[in-house]
Amino acid sequence: MFEAFAGASIAVDALNSVKSAIIGLGKASLEQARLIEQAQKRLNFAAGGRFGGGQLMNQAGTFAQNLGLSKQSTIESFSSFAVSACEAGLTSKESQSVFENTSKAIAAMGLSAEDTKGVFLAFSQMLGKGKVSSEELRQQLAERIPGAMALAAKSMNMTMPEFTKQLESGNIQSKEFVMNLTKLFGTQHGEAASENLTTLEGKLNTLENSFFDLKTTIAASLGPATMRMIESLSTQVSALATKISLMLETNLNQQNAGQLAETQARVQAENSKKSKTQLQLSIVTGK
């Protein structure tokens, strides 16, 4: 009998674990869908419409997969960069070129998702300022990609002292610099980048990408039903908030009315007491 109960308990625990895992996967899928939707909006803006934005999204995901990079972090980083590139005057094709060449350097160096974001952030800030500053180049880019300073000077056809002087003087235009440097990234790191798939980092990213694809599929299947559920829940919460507000207002009015009645009764009592006192005083004084 005890063994039967123990077996049943284990089965229940197992079912609960499976249930929790499914719920967790559903939540993760919806959160991923939210982040990718935001990235898609940025790419749509950069590409001038949904069609071009969709193409950029697919190309970024495929390119990341082929280099053993994290799809999600790559797409998020590229989408943010693409907006800055667009506002700086780069075409969609130029942005794509910068992305692909930079991704080759990232794959060759085996950079983490956080460092990947840092690299694209550095380029975004450079383009936003219009000129290259030492802060983005040295502290954000060169720290993550070894040899970036030497390539930076080479990309502008300068010696290192010449480049350093121009950099400190604020004479390096960011658009030309970013295009030239990332082109060298592609040439310098292209061959090594293809080997990233065989590394531990590359294989872990490939595994992560499999879950990314799974969550994308789940989110797509849950999408319409979930949107309807969220809309319905929002309506119900709004209605509940209105009811609670009315209840609180009614309660407050009742309290105020009660306090007013108490005050009036107290004033009447005090007036009555004063009248009695005056009457007694009149009797005593005979006035």
Image (tube, grey):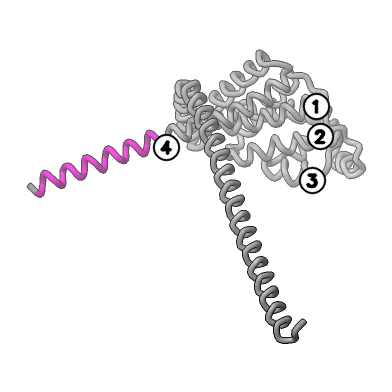
What's the CA distance linking mark 3 and mark 1? Answer: 21 Å
Residue 91 belongs to magenta span:
no
Label 1 crowd bin: few (<14), some (14–19), many (20+), radius 10 Å: few
**Disc 4 secondary structure class:** helix
The kind of residue tagged 4 is Gly
The kind of residue tagged 3 is Glu
Between 24 and 124, the one nearer to me in the picture? 24
Can you tell which quarter of the image residue 16 is in?
A: top left
The residue shown at (65%, 37%) is 117
Q: Which residue is mark 1?
A: 87
In the rendered image, the quadrant that contains the C terminus is: bottom right
Q: Which residue is mark 2?
A: 128
Most common secondary structure along the magenta stretch: helix
Is 86 on the left or on the right of 251, as rendered?
right
**Disc 3 secondary structure class:** helix
Q: Earlier in the sequence, mark 2 or mark 4?
A: 4
Q: What residue span does the magenta drawing correspond to?
A: 2-24
The residue shown at (65%, 19%) is 56
Label 3 crowd bin: few (<14), some (14–19), many (20+), radius 10 Å: few
**Disc 2 secondary structure class:** helix
- The image shows residue 172 at horizontal and vertical percentages of 88, 35
Q: Earlier in the sequence, mark 4 or mark 1?
A: 4
Q: Earlier in the sequence, mark 3 or mark 1?
A: 1
Q: Which residue is mark 3?
A: 135
Q: Are marks 2 and 1 in contact (CB under 8 Å)?
A: yes
Q: Which residue is mark 4?
A: 24
